[in-house]
Image: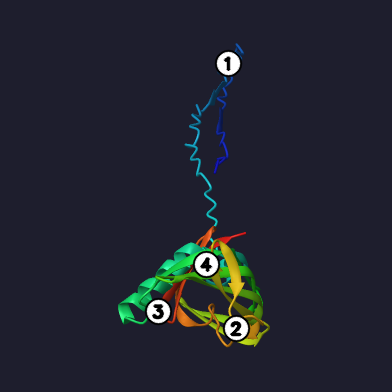
Amino acid sequence: MKATLPIAFVLLLAACGGGDAATTTEASTAESTTSAAETTTTAAPTTTVAETTTTAGASGADCVAGTWELDSEAFIESLAENFADAGEVPVELTFGGGSYTVELGSDGSMSAVREAWQFRFETAEGAIINTIEGTDSGMYSIEGDTMTVTSTDSTTTLSIQAEVDGELVDLPFGAAPQTIDQDTFSGSGQFECTDDTLTVTLEGTTSIFDRR
């Protein structure tokens, strides 16, 4: 900010007068001296303050709102580790392809789409492939670093096939698509969100999403 100070000027004026004699008149005029006080002006120092604008990164619900695609390979690996720790799956579980996309609205709405999303059970007899198609919808909420997701409607179907000589063969109990009651993206747990990545741990399973 630059400050401007007023300048004061002082003017001093002095005048002197004389007297008369009997036979001679002398006019005596004193010199008038005008003196102006010297004024010294010192400019006030100028201080420049840099203005800093800080833009806070999005957080909480503002950050998670958007469209996200699941890192399916990392998700299946996390799922396999959980099963292995529990001793429930004596086979190798791997990701087989497809996509899983979740859209989180700024109004708290949630919708998820799985397209040809596959995971494989590798056994000594061969691979069993589960293929999931369909959509889920529901709501989510944020409280601190905790996300709660509730699925209210699902049209998801499951097909189960065996891989024989490189070809997929429908199994008798999986030849026709079946409606399944499983919600991969549901439950309550901690989350972390950045501009590019959303990481959520729901029911002990960690899901990593990339923003689309």
In this rendering, the answer to whether 151 lies above or below 54 is below
Image-quadrant location for residue 82: bottom left
State the residue position of label 4. Answer: 59
Which residue bears the numbered disc 2?
Answer: 172
Q: Is residue 65 visible?
A: no
Can residue 136 be seen here? The reply is yes
Q: CA distance from mark 4 to mark 1?
A: 93 Å
Task: Choose the circle earlier in sequence order: 2 or 1.
Answer: 1
Instruction: Answer left or right for 196 relative to 112.
Output: left
Query: Of the residues shown, which amino acid type is indicated by label 3?
Result: Gly
Looking at the image, how many numbered discs can be counted on the residues?
4
Within 10 Å of disc 1 (Cα), the crowding (few <14, some 14-19, many 20+) is few
Residues at marks 3 and 4, CA–CA distance in whole angstroms? 23 Å
Badge 3 crowding class, 10 Å Cα cut-off, few under 14, some 14 to 19, many 20 or more, is some
Residue at the spot 50% in from the left edge and 33% down from the top edge: 43
Q: Earlier in the sequence, mark 3 or mark 2?
A: 2
Secondary structure type for disc 3: loop
Q: Identify which residue is drawn at 38% across, 78% down.
A: 89
Q: Pointer 1: what residue?
A: 28
List the residue tagged with mark 3: 204
Residue lying furthest top in this view? 24
Residue 34 x/y as whole percent: 56, 23
